[in-house]
C-alpha cells in the first residue's frame, strides 16, 4: 500500500472502521497501523465522525413481515439441507456487503457534503439536543482555520422573523459569547474571530437560542434556548 496516498489512507481507514475489509486485509492494515501515526489518526477520525450517526437515531423494531420472511426462508433452507448452507452464505455475504456499502455512502454524504471537507478532521465536536434528548444539531470546530460547521439534523425553522444563534457557554456561570448566526441550509459555516475561538475552546457547553432576525440586540441570549450540548475535544 502506498501510505503516502492520503486519499487511499482515508478510504482504507473508512473500510476498517465500518468492517468492509476482508479478514486478511484487516490484519495487514492493523499491523501497519501500529507503526504509522497517520493511519491511526485516520482511523480515529472515522470513528469520531461515524459515532455521531447513532446519536440522532431512534431504536426501531423490525416489522412483523420481516420475521415472517425470515421464518419462510429458514423453512425453505431446511427442506434442502445439502445446498442451504451455501445459499445462506451467499445471501448473507451479499446482504452484508450491500448494507455496509450503504453505511459508507450515507456517512460520506452526511460528513463530507463538499469535497473540501474530506481531509479536515474536527478537533472539537458537540451534539446539541432538545428537551426530549433527541440530537438536533452537530457542531464541529476546526483548529487550523478557526471554522465552525453546524449541521442541522432536520430541525424545524425558528419561525418568521427569527433566527438561530450559536453561543459558547463558559464554566462558572460567566456570560455566554455569541459565535454567530445559523443560515437557512442544512450546513452552516462560521468563521470565528480570535476572541470567539478562545471562547469556544474554553467553553464547556454550546447552546442555540432563538433570536430576532439579525441576532440578539443585547449581546446575550434574549429568546428561548431550546438546544444545548457539551463540547468534546477529539
Image (tube, rainbow, N blue to C red):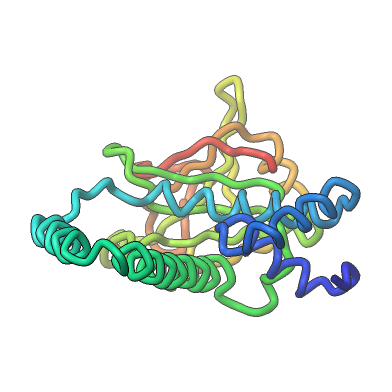
Closer to the camera, 103 or 1? 1
- Relative to 210, say whether 206 is above or below: above
Residue positioned most to the top: 172
Q: Measuring 87% from the left and 50% from the top, which residue is drawn there? A: 37
Residue positioned most to the front: 82
Residue 99, quarter of the rendered image = bottom left
Whole-percent x, y for residue 23 in the image: 64, 57
Whole-percent x, y for residue 140 in the image: 61, 54
Whole-percent x, y for residue 202 in the image: 70, 34
In the image, taking residue 100 as reference, residue 140 lies left or right, namely right
Residue 193 in sight from this viewpoint: no
Total marks drawn? 0
Quadrant the C terminus occupies: top right
In the image, taking residue 115 as reference, residue 32 lies left or right, namely right
Closer to the camera, 70 or 183? 70
Q: Measuring 50% from the left and 73% from the top, which residue is drawn there? A: 105
Q: Measuring 66% from the left and 46% from the top, which residue is drawn there? A: 124
Quadrant the N terminus occupies: bottom right
- Relative to 157, say whether 173 is above or below: above
Whole-percent x, y for residue 179 in the image: 60, 52
Amino acid at each position: 500500500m502506498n501510505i503516502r496516498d492520503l486519499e487511499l489512507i482515508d478510504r482504507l481507514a473508512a473500510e476498517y472502521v465500518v468492517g468492509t475489509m476482508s479478514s486478511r486485509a484487516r490484519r495487514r492494515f492493523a499491523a501497519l497501523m501500529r507503526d504509522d501515526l497517520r493511519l491511526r489518526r485516520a482511523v480515529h477520525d472515522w470513528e469520531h465522525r461515524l459515532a455521531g450517526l447513532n446519536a440522532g437515531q431512534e431504536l426501531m423494531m423490525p416489522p412483523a413481515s420481516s420475521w415472517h420472511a425470515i421464518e419462510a426462508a429458514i423453512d425453505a433452507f431446511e427442506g434442502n439441507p445439502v445446498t442451504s448452507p451455501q445459499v445462506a452464505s451467499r445471501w448473507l455475504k451479499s446482504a452484508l456487503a450491500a448494507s455496509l456499502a450503504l453505511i459508507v455512502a450515507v456517512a460520506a454524504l452526511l460528513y463530507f457534503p463538499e469535497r473540501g471537507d474530506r481531509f479536515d478532521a474536527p478537533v472539537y465536536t458537540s451534539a446539541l439536543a432538545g428537551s426530549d434528548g433527541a440530537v438536533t444539531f452537530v457542531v464541529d470546530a476546526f483548529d487550523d482555520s478557526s471554522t465552525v460547521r453546524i449541521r442541522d439534523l432536520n430541525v424545524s425553522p425558528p419561525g418568521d422573523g427569527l433566527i438561530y444563534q450559536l453561543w459558547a457557554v463558559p464554566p462558572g456561570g460567566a456570560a455566554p459569547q455569541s459565535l454567530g448566526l445559523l443560515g437557512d441550509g442544512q450546513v452552516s459555516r462560521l468563521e470565528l474571530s480570535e476572541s470567539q475561538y478562545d471562547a469556544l475552546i474554553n467553553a464547556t457547553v454550546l447552546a442555540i437560542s432563538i433570536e430576532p432576525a439579525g441576532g440578539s440586540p443585547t449581546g446575550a441570549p434574549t429568546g428561548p434556548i431550546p438546544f444545548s450540548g457539551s463540547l468534546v475535544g477529539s
